[in-house]
Every structure is written in C-alpha cells, then in structure tokens.
C-alpha cells in the first residue's frame, strides 16, 4: 500500500508550456524510490509538486494523496503542518532553504518547537544533538553561526539535521548528497536505509549519482521531458534499460541535459531510433513490462 502518491501531476508555465505532463508515482511504506533522468526533466518539479511548494508563476494540476487524503484540497496552513513533521523535504539549494538572519541552531530548534511544542531549552538540546549527529561539531558553537558562514556541504548537513530531527514518515530528498563529500554521502545513504528499515520511512530521492542509486537499491523512475519514461527495480533499470532513450542516457553516465522541447506528438525520439516502428508516430502508453517494470515505448528493448 502506498503512503504517498502523485496522480497525473501536471505543471505548466503561464504561457502554457508543459513542464510536467501527467506524472504518476507511488511510494509504498518502507521503501526507497529514486528519480533519475536528464537535467531539466522535471525531477525537482515533481518533488515540489508533492510538497506543495511550486512558485506562483506555475500552474498545477493533479492530486497528491497522502494516507488516503488529497493534500491539494487542504488549506495552506494545514498542509504546512504536515510538511516537516510527517513529510520531510531537503531542497537542492541549501543556501536558499535556510534563513540567512537566524543562526542555524535556532533554525533546527524552531522547527522542533513548531511541530512538537518543545520548550526553548528542550529545543536547544535536541538541535545540538541533531547537528552533532550530522558531524557538525562542536554543535553548540556551530549552532550559533549563520548559514552564509558555512560551506555548501555544511549547509546541506544542517538541512539534514533539521529533517531527521523531526522523524517524518516520508522523506523527499532533492540531490541531498550533492554537496557532500564521498564519506558523508556514504553515511547519508546508510542513515536513509536505516530509517527505511527500522521506522518504515518512505523515501523519494532525486539523484544524478548513479553509483549511489545502485548502492542503495530500491526502485528507480527515469523521467525525461516531464514524463515517466520507465520504472522498475533500480538495479534492473540501470543494468538493462528497456527504453532506447534510457539506454542512450545511462550509457553516457546519466549526466546529460534535455536539449529538446516537450511537445509529444508520437515518440519524440523516433527519428534515428533503431527500434522505430510505424506506431511510434502515436503517443506511447506507459505499459507494464513484467517483473515490476513499466516502459513508455511501443517497441522496447528486451529485458
């Protein structure tokens, strides 16, 4: 059973350009799902759509179902209560997510007071413990610093300290390891896996690091041009992609940008595709391919 699901998520600019074009995904309880794909594919937009944090310049359509409730129908204040305490979010740019005029220790403590009603003293103690857990020591001294005085990696760890201290049931991680060194990346992967194993947390993790995806495992969803191209067990998708574009993208290390528009009139990759058939002029469906896999292709590669 899924604890969080996005149904037909659609995002457009004011000019009507589609940025997400009907993304569907489910997060089962106690699972890790990676979002991978080219830069500009819509991965971060998917996370922001689930969290209800899209900028006002974009229009949104679809449903976000959490524990059977459609979060898009909730009042903003009630949804903010869920965000943090039950749904934790780590954004790609930690410098933009941290208030520049409040010491980072207070930021972590304020979240604990807001969501759990801790006293100021309790919040300070818990915040220092959370910072120390992320290797930010001495926690008391570092907690008095402002975000601009910290490195990118340290700011990322402050955000992680804040999120983990609230013990949410769902984690939405947008390149959460991007600013971390290799040792800290490995530690984050271990911590997230432990949260899944011991507390049954559900994780949706945007990552360009395919080695991290392979090491952690779980499921993977490959996005391109605002749509799900294929999904399945992470190792199977990485080792034997079914969509010709997936093979091309993963064969180049998973580090390419979109480089094309998002209009869908048949398969956008049909020109030059060795598996092109006549039906590729029609929009392909996201169809089951066996063994828990789905692919958006009329003539997919053999598994």
Image (cartoon, rainbow, N blue to C red):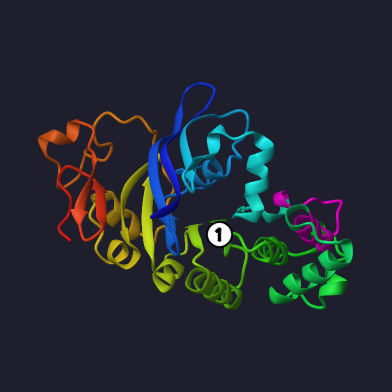
> Where residue 185 appears, x then y in whole percent?
56, 72
> Where residue 76 appears, x then y in whole percent?
66, 35
Depth order, front residue of 142/28: 28
> Where residue 45 appears, x then y in whole percent?
52, 42
Callout 1 environment at 10 Å: few (<14), some (14 to 19), or many (20+)? many
Depth order, front residue of 44/60: 60
Q: Is residue 109 rendered magenta in the image?
A: yes
Residue under label 1, please give it. Answer: 169
In the rendered view, tell whether residue 243 sits above or below residue 190: above
Query: Which stretch is magenta?
Result: 96-113
From the image, which quarter does the N terminus lie in? bottom left
Q: Quadrant of residue 293?
A: bottom left
- Residue at screen point 46% across, 44% down: 68
Residue 286 in view of the camera? yes
In the rendered view, tell whether residue 44 sits above or below residue 158: above
From the image, which quarter does the C terminus lie in? bottom left
Q: Is residue 135 left or right of residue 183?
A: right
- Residue at screen point 57% across, 65% down: 177
**Majority SS type along the magenta span:** helix
- Residue at screen point 47% across, 59% down: 208
Q: Secondary structure at mark 1?
A: loop
Outermost residue to the top: 15
Depth order, front residue of 52/253: 52
Depth order, front residue of 129/250: 129
> Where residue 106 appears, x then y in whole percent?
84, 60
Q: Is residue 127 rendered magenta in the image?
A: no
Q: Is residue 290 left or right of residue 236?
A: left
Total numbered labels? 1
């Amino acid at each position: 059973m899924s604890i969080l699901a996005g149904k037909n998520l659609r995002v457009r600019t004011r000019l009507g350009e589609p940025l997400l074009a009907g993304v569907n995904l489910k997060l089962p309880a106690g699972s890790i799902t990676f979002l991978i794909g080219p830069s500009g594919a819509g991965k971060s937009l998917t996370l922001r759509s689930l969290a209800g944090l899209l900028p006002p310049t974009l229009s949104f359509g679809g449903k976000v179902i959490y524990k059977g409730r459609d979060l898009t129908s909730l009042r903003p204040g009630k949804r903010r209560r869920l965000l943090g305490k039950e749904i934790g979010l780590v954004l790609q740019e930690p410098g933009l997510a941290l208030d520049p005029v409040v010491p980072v220790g207070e930021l972590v403590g304020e979240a604990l007071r807001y969501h759990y009603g801790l006293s100021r003293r309790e919040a300070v103690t818990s915040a220092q413990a959370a910072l120390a857990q992320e290797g930010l020591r001495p926690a008391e001294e570092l907690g008095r610093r402002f975000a601009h005085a910290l490195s990118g990696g340290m700011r990322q760890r402050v955000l992680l300290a804040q999120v983990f201290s609230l013990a949410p049931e769902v984690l939405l991680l947008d390149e959460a390891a991007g600013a971390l060194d290799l040792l800290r990346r490995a530690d984050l992967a271990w911590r997230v896996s432990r949260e899944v194993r011991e507390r049954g947390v559900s994780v949706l993790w945007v990552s360009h690091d395919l080695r991290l995806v392979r090491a952690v495992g779980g499921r993977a969803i490959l996005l391109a041009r605002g749509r799900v191209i294929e999904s399945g067990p992470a190792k199977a998708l990485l080792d034997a992609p079914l969509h010709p574009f997936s093979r091309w993208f993963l064969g180049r290390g998973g580090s390419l940008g979109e480089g094309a528009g998002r209009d869908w009139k048949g398969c956008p990759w049909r020109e030059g595709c060795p598996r092109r058939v006549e039906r590729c002029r029609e929009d392909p469906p996201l169809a089951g391919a066996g063994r828990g896999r789905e692919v958006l292709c009329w003539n997919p590669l053999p598994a």
